[in-house]
Image (tube, rainbow, N blue to C red):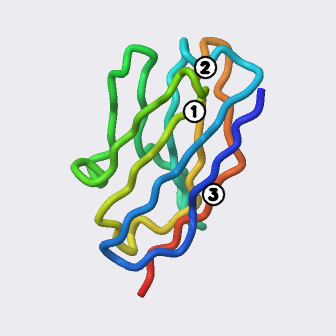
């Protein structure tokens, strides 16, 4: 199983980014996919999750600004991030939660700075 994340980068406060995470080697459609983030020196925290039935969970800090979506035909989960602020700066990790074990992508850096 491999998860390949992309789409991070440097953006000014108030800007937007879209992260993508493509899964291979697994039946993506039956599993929960999502995103966590981690700032150096801090614990990894949940950002957003979407189940196979498209129910969603968001961290309070990103509600109304971030939107998670998935395309099962492409084995991909997305995170649209709008109105970014410096507190969103972190390494973003995509995850696929299966009944047996979670799988993690390699992380993509998001930096929000003027």
Quadrant (top left/top right/bottom left/bottom right) for the N terminus: top right
Q: Quadrant of residue 16?
A: bottom left
Corner quadrant of residue 61: bottom left
**Disc 1 designates what residue?**
76
Q: Quadrant of residue 98?
A: top right
Count of number-bearing discs: 3
Q: Distance between the Cα atoms at labels 3 and 1?
A: 15 Å
Determine the CA span between mark 2 and mark 3.
Answer: 20 Å
Q: Residue at x 71, y 18 (%)?
A: 26
Above or below, 31 relative to 105? above
In the displayed structure, 48 sits above or below 80; it is above
Residue 90, percent from left and from top: 53, 64
| N-term mark: 1 or 2 | 2
Marks 3 and 1: which is nearer the front? 1
The mark that comes first in sequence, 2 or 3, is 2
- Of the 4 image quadrants, the one containing the C terminus is bottom left
Percent x, y of residue 109:
60, 64
Q: Secondary structure at mark 1?
A: strand
For disc 3, the marked residue is 108
Q: Which residue is mark 2?
A: 28
Q: Residue at x 52, y 53 (%)?
A: 37
Left or right placement of residue 83 versus residue 20 in this view: left
Residue 100 percent across, percent down from the top left? 67, 13
* Element at label 2: helix
Q: Is residue 19 above or below residue 75?
A: below
Q: Are marks 1 and 2 in contact (CB under 8 Å)?
A: yes
Residue furthest bottom as drawn:
114
Q: x and y percent of residue 40 in the render?
A: 60, 67
């Amino acid at each position: 199983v491999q998860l390949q994340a992309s789409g991070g980068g440097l953006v000014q406060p108030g800007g937007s980014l879209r992260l993508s995470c493509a899964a291979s080697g697994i039946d993506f459609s039956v599993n929960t996919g999502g995103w966590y983030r981690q700032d150096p020196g801090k614990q990894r925290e949940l950002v957003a999750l979407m189940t196979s039935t498209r129910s969603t969970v968001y961290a309070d800090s990103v509600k109304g600004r971030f939107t998670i979506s998935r395309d099962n035909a492409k084995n991909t989960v997305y995170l649209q991030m709008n109105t970014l602020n410096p507190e969103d700066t972190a390494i973003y990790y995509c995850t696929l939660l299966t009944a047996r074990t979670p799988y993690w992508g390699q992380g993509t850096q998001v930096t929000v700075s003027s």
